[in-house]
Image: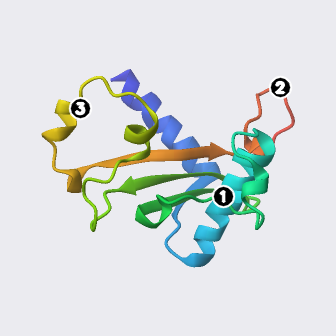
Amino acid sequence: MHWEATLNSVIDAFNLYFEMISADTDVLKQEVYKLRYQVYCLETGFEDAKQYPLGLEFDEYDPYAKHYLIRHRRTGEYAATTRMILANPSRLNAEFPLERYFQIDDYSVLGKLNRNHLFEASRLCVSKTFKQRKSELTLL
């Protein structure tokens, strides 16, 4: 079972340097939105920074999402974030972003699923500070 040992070593290495935090307070959600602004607006230009004058990148899906941060243990810096968008309980037929922005070949599969049991993982981003290669200076 070599793959299990490899998986455990990767998880152990991650846990040695990082911790995953549920962003379940307003303060932590602000950190999520700041990191998303940094990555999506300033670092990659994926989003227009002018649309977010407060320096916080968020959208209409965030109220129905569970947010997570990955924090570097030694420095306390937030390295990454992601979210899980849950079904909107007041509008169960509301589209997830993938449904809205991408072509899905076979909607019949989705129609058979209870939307209360669906979620979409999205807005995964990693700060450029933590996107370094082995040959570069590292925070680790």
Please tell me whether mark 1 sits on a helix, a strand or a loop: loop
Please tell me whether mark 3 sits on a helix, a strand or a loop: helix
Mark toward the start of the polypeptide (2 vs 3): 3
Kindly identify which residue carries mark 1.
57
Q: Can residue 93 be seen in this snapshot?
A: yes
Percent coordinates x, y for residue 58 in the rendering: 60, 59
Kindly identify which residue carries mark 2.
135
Please tell me whether mark 2 sits on a helix, a strand or a loop: loop
Count every numbered label the image shows and give the total.
3
Question: Which numbered disc, 1 or 2, marks the residue closer to the eye?
Answer: 1
Kindly identify which residue carries mark 3.
107
View extreme (right): residue: 137
Percent coordinates x, y for residue 7 in the rendering: 44, 33
Q: Hey, which quadrant is residue 124 in on the image?
A: top right
**In the image, residue 133 above or below residue 71:** above
Mark toward the start of the polypeptide (1 vs 2): 1
Percent coordinates x, y for residue 42 in the rendering: 80, 47
Q: Residue at x 22, y 51 (%)?
A: 115
- Quadrant including the N terminus: top left
Q: What type is the residue that disc 2 sits on?
A: Ser
Mark toward the start of the polypeptide (1 vs 3): 1
Question: Which numbered disc, 2 or 3, marks the residue closer to the eye?
Answer: 3
Q: What type is the residue that disc 1 sits on?
A: Glu
CA gap between label 2 and label 3 equals 45 Å
View extreme (left): residue: 112
CA gap between label 1 and label 2 equals 32 Å
Bin the neighbour count of mark 1 within 10 Å (Cα to Cα): few under 14, some 14-19, many 20 and up. many
Bin the neighbour count of mark 3 within 10 Å (Cα to Cα): few under 14, some 14-19, many 20 and up. few
Percent coordinates x, y for residue 40 in the rendering: 70, 45
Q: What type is the residue that disc 3 sits on?
A: Tyr
